Amino acid sequence: MDVYDSLELLAQEDASLLRLAGEAAEKAYAPYSRFRVGAAGKMKDGSVVTGSNQENASFPAGLCAERVLLASASSLFPGMSIETIAISSLDADGHSHDHPISPCGICRQSLLEFQQRVKRPVRLILGGLRGKIYLIPDASFLLPLAFTGSDLM
């Protein structure tokens, strides 16, 4: 994992993707937690897909931004890999967090299974528009000792 102290130190393409994740967070439907998360994924062909969390009064029936993005990417670009996913979040006042937010357990499992399905690692950029940013070269690093489909056989 690489750690950067600010958005300005990232490669331009990575900084742009993280900004798009921040914009996606603004579109989140989070009236209960007020914790808005956005994700932006750059597909293998250069297309960008975004997602934001979508809450529901029937907790925990909501969807995280990462899973919204994965479902959209799988529907729009069947079988295509995602090269990089940037994940950003906003606090209850709508300000970008000043530290990286890591995907939850279900999202970690979903990211791992997506990259197994397309047979390519998914690179992650975790951060806000200010503060530290983490670059993780492979989503599987978030879920060591993962339970996978091969465990079911």
Image (cartoon, rainbow, N blue to C red):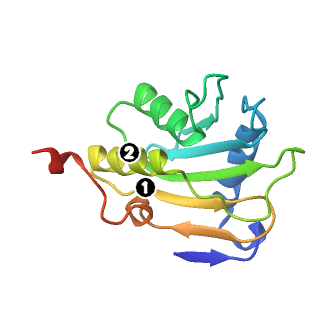
- In front: 113, or 13? 113
Amino acid type, label 2: Ser
Q: Earlier in the sequence, mark 1 or mark 2?
A: 2
> Residue 124's x, y, as percent?
53, 59
Number of the label disc, if any, that sits on residue 37: none
* Image quarter of residue 54: top right
Q: Is residue 142 above or below residue 149?
A: below
Residue at screen point 54% across, 33% down: 68
> Residue 74's x, y, as percent?
41, 32
The residue mark sitting in front, 1 or 2, is 1
* For the residues bearing labels 1 and 2, Cβ distance under 8 angstroms: yes
* Image quarter of residue 51: top right
Residue at screen point 15% across, 44% down: 152
Q: Residue furthest right?
A: 93
Residue at screen point 85% across, 44% down: 92
* Image quarter of residue 97: bottom right
Q: Secondary structure at mark 2?
A: loop
Q: Secondary structure at mark 1?
A: loop
- In front: 72, or 89? 89
Q: Residues within 10 Å of mark 2 (few under 14, many from 20)?
A: many
The residue singled out by tag 1 in the image is 122
> Residue 39's x, y, as percent?
62, 44
Amino acid type, label 1: Val
The residue singled out by tag 2 in the image is 81
Q: Quadrant of the C terminus?
A: top left
Q: CA distance from mark 1 to mark 2?
A: 8 Å
